[in-house]
Image (cartoon, rainbow, N blue to C red):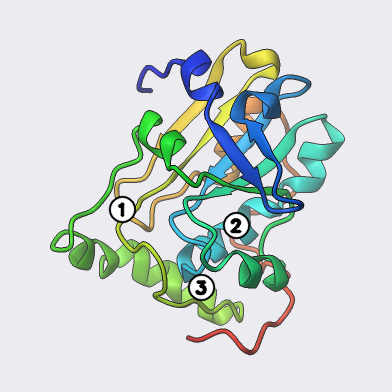
Amino acid sequence: MAKVDLDKVGKNLLKSADGGEKVELQSLWQAQPVVVFFLRRFGCQVCRWMAAEISKLEPDLRANGVSLVGVGPEEFGLQEFKEGGFFKGSIYVDEEKKCYKDLGFKRYTALSVVPAALGKKVRDISSKASDAGIKGNFSGDLLQSGGLIIVAKGGESMLLHFIQDSPGDFVPLEDISKALGLSATVTAGQKPMVRPFPSLNP
């Protein structure tokens, strides 16, 4: 796990998807542990599937006093993402991408993003997403990668720090539960329930 200065990254500002107010990242873990999922893009089909997958943990997380948060690197595609019902937690935007930078989430180059996006992991998840009725588009910043962090209450420690290598990389649900010391009642790969949103482009 890469060393992260929680005090430094915690001071970065996020914009709430509900109301638009600015909050410091560290405010999310002041009162309870938090799972923060950093999406590559709100319009990314693979990211939407991952959001729906992680959201299956939300009832267990909430029951155990753990907050679930999603963060995107830009507002582009946010409204469609919200209306699609892919994610069950709070949603924020890191407009300056400072959290992405401070947490070590890499950016692809125009040359490296194509083979990464065509890799087997991405193809496999795209197939699962399509089977679940989840579509996406290629609008917005295609070069940003994402990841996931789990922070203990009060910012006492980083329980998990995951950095995507491939756009198809994600943390298994059981690993999220294990990092928090919880027993999950969901099974990875169960078909996620999302509201149909037919106007999205494939």
For image coordinates 75% across by 53% down, the residue present is: 18
Q: CA distance from mark 2 to mark 1?
A: 16 Å
For image coordinates 63% across by 51% down, the residue present is: 54
**Disc 3 secondary structure class:** helix
The tag on residue 128 is 3
Residue occupying the far top of the picture? 156
Tags 2 and 1 touching, CB below 8 Å: no
Q: CA distance from mark 2 to mark 3?
A: 13 Å
The number of callouts visible is 3
Q: Identity of the amino acid at label 3?
A: Lys
38 or 12: nearer the viewer: 12
**Disc 1 secondary structure class:** loop
Q: Name the residue carrying label 1.
A: 166
Is 51 left, or right, of 181 in this rendering?
left
Q: Identity of the amino acid at label 2?
A: Ala
Where in the figure is residue 145, as x and y percent of width and height?
Answer: 36, 50
The tag on residue 51 is 2
Where in the figure is residue 161, as x and y percent of width and height?
Answer: 46, 29
Placement of 168 over or under 66, stated as above or below: below
Q: Identity of the amino acid at label 1?
A: Ser
Residue occupying the far right of the picture? 63
Placement of 97 over or under 137, stated as above or below: above
Placement of 138 over or under 47, stated as above or below: below
Is 190 left, or right, of 47 in this rendering?
right
Which dot, 3 or 1, sits closer to the camera? 1
